[in-house]
């Protein structure tokens, strides 16, 4: 499938940029579903895998093109795995505005504040363990019987206050011991080399080359 057009089942501009960089070595054009008039899918499931598959199939059906979906979030063992699949709206949905990215920043701030509150009772390094999890699912069509599935997990420690201004979501709160900084203190190049999404994207690229002949 040379020159494949792949619809990203998301309207998150920063996620699109990350995946464009991570999959840039493949002969494909990654486009956000919103640019094609595709609405966001429901995410009713309890696992990242099920939600990613549902989103990929929805985008493929609506666009009649191949699609890829990323379902990712933060899992904190001390909180029973929360925020988990509701990471994007952990604090409940904030009021939407005409500026999509401004709304997303407000949502991120509310989510981070709630997480900090709920982690106050946990003070030891073991209790403050957390991981970013990413599941990528790609389908050639809505009824593709052989979806490609890739996983990535990135371990870290939650801080008691935010540090760094880059990235998005919970990036300012997750300190990566091996890097000596939070995710939000990394450059895009650093993050794209070691992140949960980078790990999943590397697996996905290998699968696309093998199964799809890219």
Image: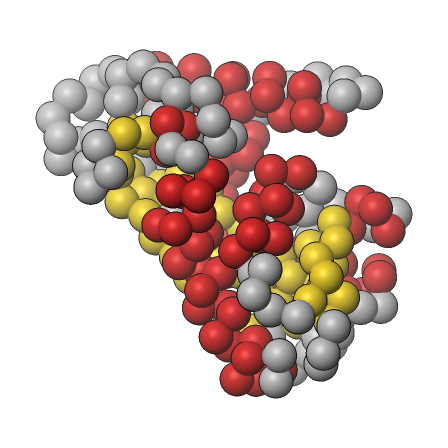
Q: Is residue 52 visible?
A: no
Q: Residue at x 84, y 61 (%)?
A: 63
**Left or right relative to 78: residue 108:** right
In front here: 174 or 24?
24
Q: Is residue 205 above or below residue 145?
A: above
Q: Residue at x 72, y 78 (%)?
A: 2
**Numbered label tally:** 0
Q: Is residue 88 above or below residue 112?
A: below
- In the figure, residue 203 lies in which quadrant? bottom left
Q: Residue furthest right?
A: 37
Q: Residue at x 56, y 30 (%)?
A: 89
In front here: 17 or 92?
17
- In the figure, residue 27 lies in which quadrant? bottom right
**Left or right relative to 24: residue 29:** right
**Left or right relative to 57: residue 92:** left
Q: Residue at x 61, y 53 (%)?
A: 20
Q: Is residue 214 above or below residue 118?
A: below
Q: Position of residue 160 (x, y in %)?
A: 27, 16
């Amino acid at each position: 499938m040379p020159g494949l057009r792949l619809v990203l089942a998301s309207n998150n501009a920063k996620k699109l940029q990350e995946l464009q960089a991570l999959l840039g070595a493949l002969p494909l054009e990654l486009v956000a579903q919103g640019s094609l008039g595709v609405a966001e899918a429901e995410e009713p499931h309890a696992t990242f895998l099920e939600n990613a598959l549902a989103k990929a199939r929805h985008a493929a059906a609506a666009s009649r093109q191949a699609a890829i979906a990323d379902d990712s979030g933060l899992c904190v063992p001390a909180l029973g795995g929360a925020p988990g699949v509701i990471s994007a709206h952990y604090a409940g949905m904030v009021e939407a505005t005409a500026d999509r990215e401004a709304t997303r920043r407000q949502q991120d701030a509310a989510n981070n504040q709630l997480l900090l509150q709920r982690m106050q009772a946990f003070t030891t390094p073991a209790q403050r363990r957390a991981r970013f999890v990413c599941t990528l699912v790609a389908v050639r069509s809505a009824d593709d019987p052989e979806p490609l599935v890739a996983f990535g997990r990135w371990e870290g420690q939650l801080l008691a206050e935010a540090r760094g201004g880059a990235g998005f979501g919970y990036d300012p709160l997750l300190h990566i011991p091996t890097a000596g900084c939070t995710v939000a203190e990394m450059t895009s190049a650093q993050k794209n080399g070691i992140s949960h999404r980078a790990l999943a994207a590397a697996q996905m690229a290998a699968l696309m080359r093998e199964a799809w002949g890219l």
